[in-house]
């Protein structure tokens, strides 16, 4: 489990095909001072996608990514140099500063617009239609692994029903990949776990 509070901004150092070429091994540069001591098998959220450490060095770690994950997240679009939001797994006793995030990406969204709003930036995104009902104003959502509060949602039945907006403060833009995010770019979306269970309960009589 994770909190959606990014603790480091890394980048893709190497992408290497594995087996038939459908799977990949990603090497990610990480600025943590203890990266070389991370346990093999540890979980790290990489722009919202939980990956398992299979190798590591002083300032990097590697993870194997299946064709399924590459197809269902933005990881298949990464290139050498792509920024990666990093968060280590939550430990008992750690501060829960964001919201509970599983690192299991529900879908890929699209960045629609970025506009200054007072001292912040207002981002608008489009969701896959199947996820729109799980997103509520003032609810939580994880975008590329970042825990955020939803500020606005499109009205059901409107042209914007699959859209929502969030505000990004300057600190978040500086320490995450949001600083490089532009219209047309894809993002990993994880809906709030609570919303998922509420929707499931409503399906039962």
Image (tube, grey):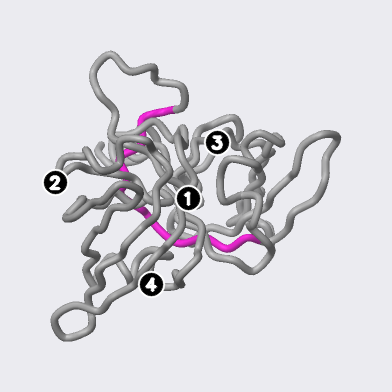
Q: Nearer the viewer, residue 139 or 89?
A: 89
Determine which residue is flagged by label 2.
Answer: 41
The answer to whether mark 2 and mark 4 are in CB contact below 8 A is no
- The part of the image, by quadrant, that contains residue 96 is top left
Q: Earlier in the sequence, mark 2 or mark 4?
A: 2
- Residue depth check, mark 3 versus mark 1: number of the one nearer the observer: 1
Determine whether, in the image, residue 142 is placed left or right of residue 126.
Answer: left
Callout 4: helix, strand or loop?
helix
Residue linked to disc 1: 144
User: Residue 180's x, y, as percent?
Assistant: 64, 57
Q: Which disc, if any, is residue 76?
A: 4
Residue 143 on image: x %, y %: 50, 47
Q: Are marks 1 and 4 in contact (CB under 8 Å)?
A: no
Q: What is the quadrant of the C terminus in the image?
A: top left
* Mark 1 to mark 4 CA distance (whole Å): 14 Å
Q: Nearer the viewer, mark 2 or mark 4?
A: 2
Magenta-span inclusion, residue 107: yes
Q: Which of the two residues, 30 or 106, is positioned nearer the viewer here?
A: 30
Q: Which residues are magenta?
A: 99-111
């Amino acid at each position: 489990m994770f909190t959606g509070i990014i603790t480091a901004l890394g980048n893709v150092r190497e992408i290497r095909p594995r087996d038939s070429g459908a799977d990949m091994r990603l090497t990610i540069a990480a600025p943590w001072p203890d990266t070389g001591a991370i346990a093999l098998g540890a979980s790290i959220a990489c722009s919202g996608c939980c990956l398992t450490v299979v190798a590591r060095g002083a300032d990097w770690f590697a993870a194997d990514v299946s064709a399924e994950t590459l197809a269902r997240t933005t990881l298949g679009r990464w290139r050498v140099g792509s920024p990666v939001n990093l968060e280590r797994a939550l430990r008992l006793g750690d501060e829960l500063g964001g919201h509970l995030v599983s690192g299991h990406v529900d879908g890929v969204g699209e960045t629609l617009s970025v506009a200054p709003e007072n001292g912040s930036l207002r981002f608008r995104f489009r969701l896959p239609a199947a996820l729109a009902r799980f997103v509520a104003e003032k609810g939580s959502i994880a975008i590329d692994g970042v825990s955020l509060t939803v500020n606005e949602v499109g009205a059901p039945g409107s042209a914007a029903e699959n859209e929502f907006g969030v505000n990004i403060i300057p600190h978040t833009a500086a320490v995450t990949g949001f600083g490089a995010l532009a219209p047309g770019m894809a993002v990993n979306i994880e809906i709030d776990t609570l919303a998922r269970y509420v929707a499931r309960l409503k399906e039962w009589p």
